[in-house]
Image (cartoon, rainbow, N blue to C red):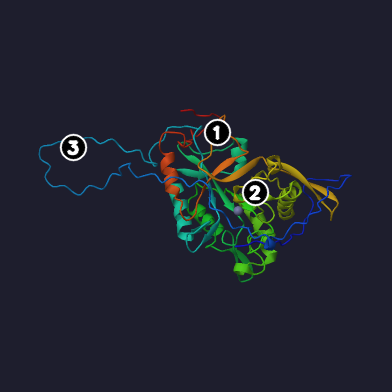
Amino acid sequence: MRYRTILPTPRLSIVLRRVGVAISVACALRPATADADAHAHAPPRAILRHEHPARAKAQPAAPKKATPSKPQPTTKQPVTSTGPRVPNELGRIPIVEWHQVVDADGTYKVSRERFRAELSELHARGYVPVNLSELLDKTMNVPAGKTPVLFTFDDASPSQFRYIERNGTLVVDPTSAVGMLLDFIKAHPDWMAKGLFCMLPAAEAGHAFFGNKGIDGQKTEWRFKKVQFLTQQGFELCNHTLWHAKLNKYSDAVVQEQLARGAMAIDSAVPGYTVRGFALPYGLWPKNRALAFNGSWYDTKSKRDVRYHHEAVFEVAGGPARSPFDPAFNPKSLPRVPLQGGTKLSATLDQMDKPGKWARYVSDGNPKTVAKP
Ligand SMILES: [Zn+2]
C-alpha cells in the first residue's frame, strides 16, 4: 500500500500567527508516490506474549451419577473478568489500536468478524470506552468495577468509515468499522461513542480522511463531512501526519510541515478543533523529538505561521498504558495494544486480569476519588 499526496484546501481558522520572517520550507514535500517506504508498515515491535491458559477454566462437569461417599472438595472460584473486581485506579488502561477492518486478518488488518468479536469481548470483560481528553484531564467517569479502554483508529481508510448513498442520502456503511461500532453501541447503551481517529488527510489509496476519488465507492467531497460526523457523535480526532511520513528520515522543516498540515487539515474540516494527540507513523520519532509535541510551519499561500501542539503522543505498541493517576503516567509516550493478524486481544486482557504490573485499572465509581489497591 502506498500513499500519495492529495492536498486538502486549508481553511486557516487554526491558531495562526502572522510572522515577519518566513520560515523557509525550500524542500517541497515529496509526494508519497516517490516515497517507496510510504506505508510499508513495519510490524509492531513488541508483540504481546500469549498467555498460556493455565487458569483452569471450569469445564462444565459431565452429569455424575451416584456420588456415594467422597465429598466434593470446595474448589476456589477462579478469578474471572466478569466477577467483582477490587477498585484500583492506578492500574493499566488498554489503548487498543486498529488499522484496516476488512475481509480477513493480516498485517495491520483485522476481519470484520474479529472486530465485532473484539468489541464484544471488551464489553463482556467490563471495559468501557473513554476519550483521550478524559484520560488527559483525569475526568474519566466509569462505573464501579469497570475499566476504561481507549479505542484508536489509525490511517483514516474507507474500511474504517464508508458512506453509502441511499435514495439521495448518505448513510454510514454498517460494514465499516464506524458503522459496526455505532451499531454495537446502540445495542449496548452502557457504551458511548468515544474513541480517537488518528487521521491522514492526504495519503493515497483512499487514506485521505476515509476515502476519495471513488476508491471503495467514496467521493472526495464526503471527506470533511465524515470528519465532522465523528466529532458530532462524540469521537475525537488525532494527527497522524499529512501522508504517513517516516519522520525519522526528514529534516526538522519537513517534520513540522507534516504535522502542521495534518493539524491544519483537521481544522479545515472542523474549524477551531483542538488536536491533542498525535500517533507516530510506524512508531518512528523525528530526530528532534521535541518537534513531535510543538512546532510551526510557514504557509506561503496564506503567509501565515501554522503552529501545532500535541499533549499526547502514541507509540505503535508496548502493552496497556499507565493510569493518568499513576505518578509515572507519561502522555508523551503512550504505549498501545495493536490488534491485527498475529496479535490477540484476549492475551492482553488475560494478563490484565492477573496481579502484576499490567493489572487493570478498576473504577470505584466515584470520579472524585482515586481508589488505590
Ligand atoms: Zn499509520
Q: Is residue 92 above or below residue 32?
A: above
Residue 354: image location, x then y, percent: 40, 37
Q: Secondary structure at mark 2?
A: strand
Query: Which of the labelled discs sits on residue 238, or is there none?
Result: 2
- Which residue is tagged 3? 72
- Which residue is tagged 1? 367
Query: Which of the labelled discs sits on residue 218, or is there none?
Result: none
Q: Mark 2 packing: few (<14 Cα in 10 Å), some, or many (20+)?
A: many
Q: Is residue 267 left or right of residue 71?
A: right
- Does mark 1's beta carbon lie closer than 8 Å to ligand 1? no
Classify residue 351 by image quadrant.
top left
- Between label 1 and label 2, give the one nearer the viewer: 2
Q: Mark 1 or mark 2, which has the lower sequence index?
A: 2
Q: Secondary structure at mark 1?
A: loop
Q: CA gap, disc 1 to disc 3?
A: 44 Å
At a point 67% along the width and 68% down the height, the residue shown is: 213
View extreme (right): residue: 20
Looking at the rendered structure, the kind of residue marked 1 is Pro
Relative depth, front residue between 186 and 1: 1
At a point 49% along the width and 54% down the height, the residue shown is: 340
Q: CA gap, disc 1 to disc 2?
A: 25 Å
Classify residue 150 by image quadrant.
top right
